């Protein structure tokens, strides 16, 4: 399995993601890898860690998320792996719930997001964003004979 961290999706990747079927609420799993030290374009705050720069982004993005009908569900440090193998562990995992693809897309393009994205770029070495959809509990899976 090839795993490639990225900070920003390419145009085609974003287009394919946001043009997918609209099927309501979903949870985005964010696997985050931080830079050892923040790298702001203007050279400021080079003494803080990438995690600290990203924390600045997190404070504000949670407010934006709520204003678009979403919510932050969980975030925590990755402390180990029990099953499987990866070359390098991510530093943190964060779960965010969005009401719809349209709401997420709108939030990503809003002026508030543009105003804070420099913290994200300063702190992140890369990440994976995985969209998940809840199981419908009433679905019955046919059993094999």
Image (cartoon, rainbow, N blue to C red):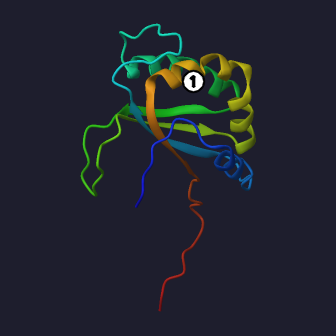
Side (left or right) of 39 relative to 89: right
Q: Looking at the image, which is closer to me, 74 or 137?
A: 74
Give the secondary structure at mark 1.
Answer: helix
Task: Say above or below: 135 vs 125.
Answer: below
Q: Residue at x 37, y 32 (%)?
A: 76
Q: Position of residue 110 (x, y in %)?
A: 73, 25
Q: Position of residue 74 (x, y in %)?
A: 45, 34
The quarter of the image holding the N terminus is bottom left
Name the residue beneath numbered marker 1. Answer: 62
Task: Say above or below: 139 vs 131.
Answer: below
Side (left or right) of 59 relative to 34: right
Q: Residue at x 57, y 36 (%)?
A: 8
Side (left or right) of 5 relative to 65: left
Q: Position of residue 134 (x, y in %)?
A: 57, 54
Q: Residue at x 71, y 48 (%)?
A: 15
Q: Position of residue 123 (x, y in %)?
A: 45, 23
Side (left or right) of 32 relative to 24: left
Q: Looking at the image, which is closer to me, 143 or 2?
A: 2
Q: Looking at the image, which is closer to me, 120 or 83?
A: 120
Q: Residue at x 26, y 56 (%)?
A: 83
Crowdedness of circle 1 by 10 Å Cα count: few (<14), some, many (20+)?
some
User: Which residue appears farthest toward the bottom when viewing the image?
Assistant: 145
């Amino acid at each position: 399995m090839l795993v490639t961290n990225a900070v920003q999706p390419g145009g085609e990747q974003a287009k394919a993601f946001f043009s997918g079927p609209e099927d309501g609420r979903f949870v985005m799993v964010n696997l985050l890898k931080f830079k050892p030290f923040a790298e702001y374009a203007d050279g400021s705050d080079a003494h803080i860690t990438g995690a600290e720069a990203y924390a600045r982004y997190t404070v504000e993005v949670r407010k934006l998320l709520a204003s678009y009908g979403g919510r932050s569900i969980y975030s925590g440090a990755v402390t180990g792996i029990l099953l499987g193998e990866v070359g390098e562990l991510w530093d943190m995992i964060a779960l965010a719930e969005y009401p719809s693809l349209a709401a997420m897309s709108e939030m990503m393009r809003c002026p508030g997001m543009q105003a804070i994205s420099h913290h994200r770029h300063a702190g992140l070495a890369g990440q994976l964003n995985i969209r998940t959809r809840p199981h419908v509990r009433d679905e019955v899976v046919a059993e094999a004979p």
